Image: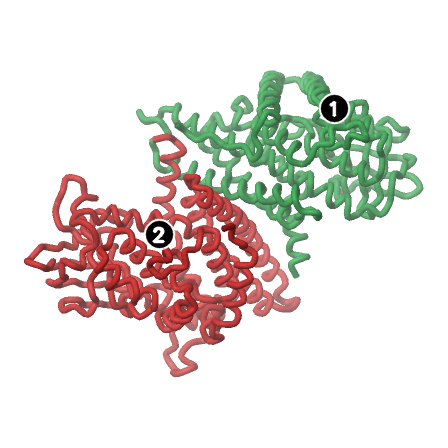
Amino acid sequence: MAVDYEAFQRDVTEFAQTRCPPEIRAVVASYRKLSRKVWQPWQQILHAHGWGAPSWPKAFGGTGWDHQQRHIFDEVMAECDCPPQYHHGLRHIGPVIIEFGTAEQQARFLPGILSGDDWWCQGYSEPGAGSDLAALRTAARREGDSYVVDGQKTWTSHAHESDWMYTLVRTSREAKKQQGITLLLIPLNAPGITIRPIRTIDGWHHVNEVFLDNVRVPVANRIGEEGQGWTYGKFLLERERLGGANVAPALKNLSRTRDLIAQELAGEAHRAKREALELRLLLAEAELHGALALGKEAVAAVMEGRPLGLLPSVMKLSTSVSHQHVAEVAMDAVGARLAPRFRRIDGSGPNAEAPGLEWVQNYMYMRVRTIYGGSSEVQKNVIAKQLFGS
Amino acid sequence: MPFTATPLIGGDAFEMAQRLALEADAELSALSEPGEHLAALRRQWDAIVELGWMATLVTEEAGGAGGDLADVAALACGAGRGGLALPLAMCGVVAPALLAAAGARDTLAQLADGTARICVILPDAACDPGTPPLRCGTTLEGGVVAVETPPDPTHLLLATAEGDVLLLPATAPGITRTLSLRIDGRLAADWHFAGVEPHLLARGLAPQIERARDLGALITCVEGVSAMGAIIEQTIAFLADRVQFNAPLASYQALRHRVAEMYVEYENLRGLVAHALRGAASADALPWRDIALAKLRLGEAGRLVAHETIQMHGGMGLTEGVAAIRLARRVMMAEFEFGDRSFQAGRLLARAA
């Protein structure tokens, strides 16, 4: 049966406007970094409505929506200031468990992801393995029914508020470094795990170092075959290739920044600066509209089963820089009066932070856009290889 | 397989236009005398008129082909890859749009069959500092400069900021003309008027004039995207071929990344222009905002692609003998057609407030 996408969009919009609590939308609208405290109740609301997992098949409690519906859902959520769903369970490890997990693993792990009761983080990067992820050295050795894991993960987003970490570990040394990697699901309350916050330039706590010191993990927590972890990791990334198609959050930030400029730089005295910033914002907007058009092309391609080619890399490069440009414009609007008040020495409680400081924090946070999810340099390598034919 | 750009609109018309444009470019690039260049442009113009290009958007009742925007866009895609040095957007799109709005059926028929070669003067046409601008009262006085024109123009189609549309014989008493070649090898004319009798076609057409300009901007964007795709292909071919420090330039990551950056700019613009083109073909009202955003991006992305290809061609990038470099000058020139970045930004910001 053909889907009535317009009716679908109306349903989603009505749901978003009526069912997302104002206090949650206020956090999203204020541009602050989200945490489990905001995400979890929203996931519970979505789950109760049957929309807990837009990208999962119905058999596993998902909505069974097609790509066009999922794209509409994501766009509407952003336009209505609803939080994007926390991705580590729903979009990353969940689909891997659905594809490669045993029936027991599916029954054990999927319900908690759907309901929002279990919180997941990703144990991929290490001090010596960033863009070159396959260089990872955290090792797991087999002892009876367990693996014993030793090593260190880093840049682990939300580890401090997570219950589980899906983790790539090395189980053997092979000629090719992509081989001999295994995917384990590790409970973060296991003895031998230490989580330390990393102080990032934005002043928010969202990433951590995770130390694993002789951590015992049951073999039952291994996904798929030993030594095949790289394949599952790639499967995960393939599924995320449409992630950059959703430009709505960036456009939302752009319109917030436009309002900020109008407020912050009202009046004749600020006219020259206001107009200069508005022009820069407009250039970012034009580029985002290009990415928006490419996003629609990408969704259409997936719907028709055509290959995406270089579109995901192009969208990632394009939107990451536009995000940064928008954040820079906001920083230039308020930086002179807020950057000097980054950390209060005096004052506490509600006065602990200067109002509006999130613009400064967000400007610095946005620098990560061109680094995570495949750095710009890696994306350019990918594009060049294809363009040059070698 | 190295990169090959996919045209926004492919097909027979695209293939034919590309072939013609490449041949025309080869002919022009061998000429150094401006007079010879002008004569060649006239022959090339006659050839596209003969092929019916100017009749594309003219209705069948007025003696045209009754085609739509996609038909012209297909021609522009092909023409853009060869940097065709003829005013396709101005004469094939803007002129018929203005003439149709003014109800000038006879002139439309003449445009279509080639007996009229029309130079269109839009509001905000350039004017030299210190010289009197064009004034339109009981007579026409003053002047405009650097107006794109077909060879040997027979008519001037003048649209004013007030919404008047005038049609004048190009040889009317009191009109003087100075021709130049633009940086992209196209023809431009300075027009000076002294006591020229105005022939008013219609009044109150300000919205239609704006629409005509936007159509011109859209087709310029189509040409620009096409040219940029060809530039990237040719840059890649040059880098693969050229050996320095005992290795092809294509093996150096610094250069490969710059080509990737060109491609991202190109793709982003292509998406935007394709979107605007679809909107223009399907919506009742022209999506002026999408077109303005696209033209703004053409300015930004086009400059980057043009500058990078010049840089990566090294010394050869400073010569007129390289096709990619001629295309780069075409893209540079496109910035100033149908509203530059300041113009487009100005109207977008004014109407966003």
B179 or A203: nearer the eye? A203
- Residue A301 coordinates in the image, percent (x, y): 46, 43
Which of label 1 and label 2 is nearer to you? 2
The correct choice, above or below, for B227 with respect to B277 in the image is above
Q: Which residue is mark 1?
A: B151
- Residue A318 coordinates in the image, percent (x, y): 46, 48
Label 1 marks which chain's residue? Answer: B
Label 2 marks which chain's residue? Answer: A
* Residue positioned 36% across, 24% down in the render: B243
Q: Judging from the image, what is the letter of the chain drawn in red?
A: A
B170 or A308: nearer the eye? A308
Asked whether, in this view, residue A95 is left or right of residue B305, the answer is left
Q: Secondary structure at mark 2?
A: loop
- Residue A157 coordinates in the image, percent (x, y): 30, 62
* Residue positioned 39% across, 24% down in the render: B242
Chain B rendered in what hue?
Answer: green
The amino acid beneath tag 1 is Pro
B228 or B305: nearer the eye? B228
The image quadrant of residue A35 is bottom left
Crowd band around label 2 with a 10 angstrom C-alpha radius: few (<14), some (14–19), many (20+): some
Q: Which residue is mark 2?
A: A373
